[in-house]
Image (cartoon, rainbow, N blue to C red):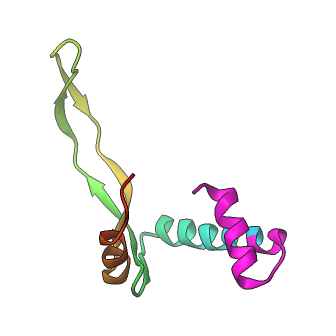
Amino acid sequence: MNKGDLIDKMAKDAGITKAAAGDALNSFMGAVKGTLQKGDKVTLVGFGTFSVSKRSARIGRNPQTGKEIKIAAKVVAKFKAGAELSASAAKAKIK
């Protein structure tokens, strides 16, 4: 499912226009981004938690040459699935 498919599904389920569903989804994504940029986390009970985490600098290897390379420290977004989401994913039919 891509963003367009999700907007279509949201519009159908909520009985609203695709434009309204798109605006709602964009608002949700903007709110999550803004919260993460402040260093806070977003918790949706049963769905999961979006948070930020700092990765330390480290030494890695170039897989083609085997040469050591320095990997810079960075801040990354993380998502941890909630119990309900994990349970429903466990019932998924893998193609």
Is 32 left, or right, of 85 in this rendering?
A: right
Is 86 left, or right, of 68 in this rendering?
A: right
Residue at the spot 39% in from the left edge and 51% down from the top edge = 95
Is 51 left, or right, of 90 in this rendering?
A: right
Q: Which residues are magenta?
A: 1-21
Corner quadrant of residue 14: bottom right
Is 14 left, or right, of 88 in this rendering?
A: right
Q: Where is the N terminus found, in terms of image quarters?
A: bottom right
Corner quadrant of residue 76: bottom left
Residue 38, percent from left and from top: 48, 70
Q: Is residue 38 above or below residue 87?
A: above
Residue 75, percent from left and from top: 36, 53
Determine the residue located farthest toward the bottom in the rendered image. Answer: 45
Q: Is residue 5 above or below residue 91?
A: above
Determine the residue located farthest toward the top in the rendered image. Answer: 65
Q: Is residue 6 magenta?
A: yes
Residue at the spot 18% in from the left edge and 38% down from the top edge = 58
Main secondary structure of the magenta stretch: helix
| Residue sitting nearer the eye, 72 or 84 | 84
Q: Is residue 72 above or below residue 22?
A: above
Q: Is residue 30 magenta?
A: no
Corner quadrant of residue 13: bottom right
| Residue sitting nearer the eye, 75 or 32 | 32
Residue 84, percent from left and from top: 36, 83
